[in-house]
Image (cartoon, coloured by chain):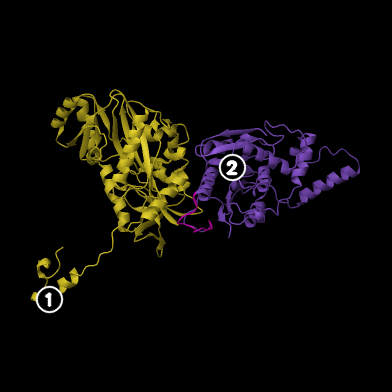
Amino acid sequence: MHYKVCGRGEKVLLFLHGWGGSCDSFLPLINILKDTYRCVSVDFYGHGATRAKRVYTLRDFTSGVREVLQKENITSCAVIAHSFGGRVALDMSDAPGVNALVIIDGAGLKPRLTLKKLARKADYKIKKLLKKDTSDCGSPDYRALTPIMKATFNNIVNTRQDDVLGQIIKPTLLIWGKDDCDTPLWMAHKMHKGIKGSRLVVLEGGHFCYLDHAFEVSGYIRNFLNGVYYGVDGGGNMRHSRGGAYSSHAGVDSTCGIQNSVK
Amino acid sequence: MNIAVVYGGTSCERDVSIITGIQALGMLDKFRYEVYPVLIGADGGMGMPENAQSIRTYIGEKPPAGAPVYFEKGALCVKGRLKSKRIRIDCALLCTHGGTGENGALQGFFEMCSIPYTSPGVEPSAICMNKITSKSIFLGLGANVLPAAKVQRGGEKETINYAKKCGYPVIVKPARQGSSIGIDVAKNDVELLAALSVAFEFDEFAIIERALENFTEINCACVKSRGEIIVSSLERPVCWKEFLTFEDKYLSGGKSGGGKINASAREFPAKIPQDKEEYIKRTSYNVYKELGMKGVVRFDYLIDNDGGEVYLNEANTIPGSLANYLFTDKGIDGNRLMDIIIEEAVAEGVDKGGKFSSDVLRAFGAAGCEACGTFSANACKIGARHI
């Protein structure tokens, strides 16, 4: 697996990009966070500068990332994952070297069946039954893939990680775009409910909200990780964002804001 | 934990303070802190602006809309239409630069209110605000400072003599202003008189010293975390004309669009000879420790490139942006720095004096009645212990 390292600091951030991205997908965040953190960003198999040699499963991706950590002698890190990277993050959440998880618009939960999806599925099944050309079926993402990556993609999307949530004991920060179409907001709420003690931040924007609000997101990450590494002192007075005298999202829809999972 | 972020104020550095305030509001962890912005208006009144984190709130002639607030013992009161709401405040995060916000006055106000605050206390704040007092104190603490003279209105003649003695160019500063405001370099008598009249616009006292012509400015900050003093690495602001004007210091970032003070050109960590670096760090540590400071304090040094001397120029007890960028190489980001100063302020508290009970009043009352039915003028004589 190809990867890039930059920044200084004793604490390490491991960046796991989304499907179709590369190690540079996090560049705006890395550029901000590298002043106090050593940032390691990988190219997943079949992405960026890492070639896909065979068909992979989610486990292969996780072990690939572990190899990178070993190579860099990293024994402790915080994982920052977007979309597909969130699947890998959930998969490696029980690893001893992982101190904390930051999941941004992460995948991994079983999607809900919508009418649109049902129609698409039916279309594909009928075409297959009638032995017609099915090459126009599937998402544009999927159609653009090589046969190896198509098989890998099938492996990945059919891996359900709903059961993992309850087992996560690592501090977790969830950052979500309010209008995310790929991994809708209900997934964030499900993860938030499933992962004990997790923090949820809902921002304006879609699946790539972290690029629109790079400064804000890095601030949330810094505060979250400071809490993880230095311990929460004096406070403990966790709150729901609603109804405070002051909200950081003043003027924004009231569904945006920050929420702590009930312990 | 309830935090009041106090910013604005009546000083010349009000706008800079608003920027620091906005930065602090952005950096505080909203999961841990309930944050209340308190803007001190240009007229001295306090209010809680709506949409406090947006810079647009503060641009324009009209003061930003928001409920008026005031502090009382341990709490912030927000005036409502019918009744005011009382909010317990655990700590005040002070982002007020210059004037009464930095000279100990506001600090004393919060001590009276029993609200812990994040800047150094009344005494060090007052000392560092005054360039004349601070020089003698720094000198007493063993720091190297540039010799200077204090000038009062009407003392122009003596000033010219002093300038001639130490040699032009000289630099003239108002005694109690920060941020290069009212500071001017004079190369001859005429310029000196002009510079003095500018300085007297800002303060009744001015300070005059030999201007270094070829020098390097070095900044170094200290912060106390869990009782231990952390000394930052050194920073060298790179952008230099003849000297740092107000615009350069604070508005240069604005031209590039970002408006980030942090983005102004600088060398960090600064590459200077090791002995000078050690001297600067040691001096900063000593002054911070001996003056019993807390919070972030930025010490500004001048290195004379001709003579090689290092001079402690001034100490900023509430530095711009709270010097949050100076600790990053130690793994402390601005967000952590906010936690550190709040934690330290709360741990130190405000009630430092022990409880003292006295029966002077009772004795005085009894003695007064006994003697003539009225109070005696000399309490000490009539039974009360010598106080």
Could you tell me residue B188's position as x and y percent? 20, 24
B288 sits left or right of B163 in the view:
right
Query: Which colour represents chain A?
Result: purple
Disc 2: which chain?
A
Disc 1: which chain?
B
Is the same chain shared between marks 1 and 2?
A: no
- What residue sits 65% from the left and 49% below the top? A94
Q: Badge 1, how many Cα within 10 Å: few under 14, some, many 20+? A: few
A89 sits left or right of B214 in the view:
right
Which secondary structure, mark 1?
helix
What's the residue type where badge 2 is placed?
Thr
Identify which residue, A74 or B174, lies in the foreground: A74
Which secondary structure, mark 2?
loop
The main secondary structure of the magenta stretch is loop
A147 sits left or right of A229 in the view:
right
Identify the residue under disc 1: B369
Query: Which colour represents chain B?
Result: yellow
Identify which residue, A42 or B241, lies in the foreground: A42
Figure check: B121 above or below B235: below
Identify the residue under disc 2: A75
Could you tell me residue B315's position as x and y percent? 31, 40
Residue lying farthest to the right in this orientation: A130
- What residue sits 12% from the left and 76% below the top? B369
Stretch of the chain drawn in magenta: A230-242
* Magenta stretch contains residue A57: no
**Cα distance between the residues tagged 1 and 2:** 79 Å
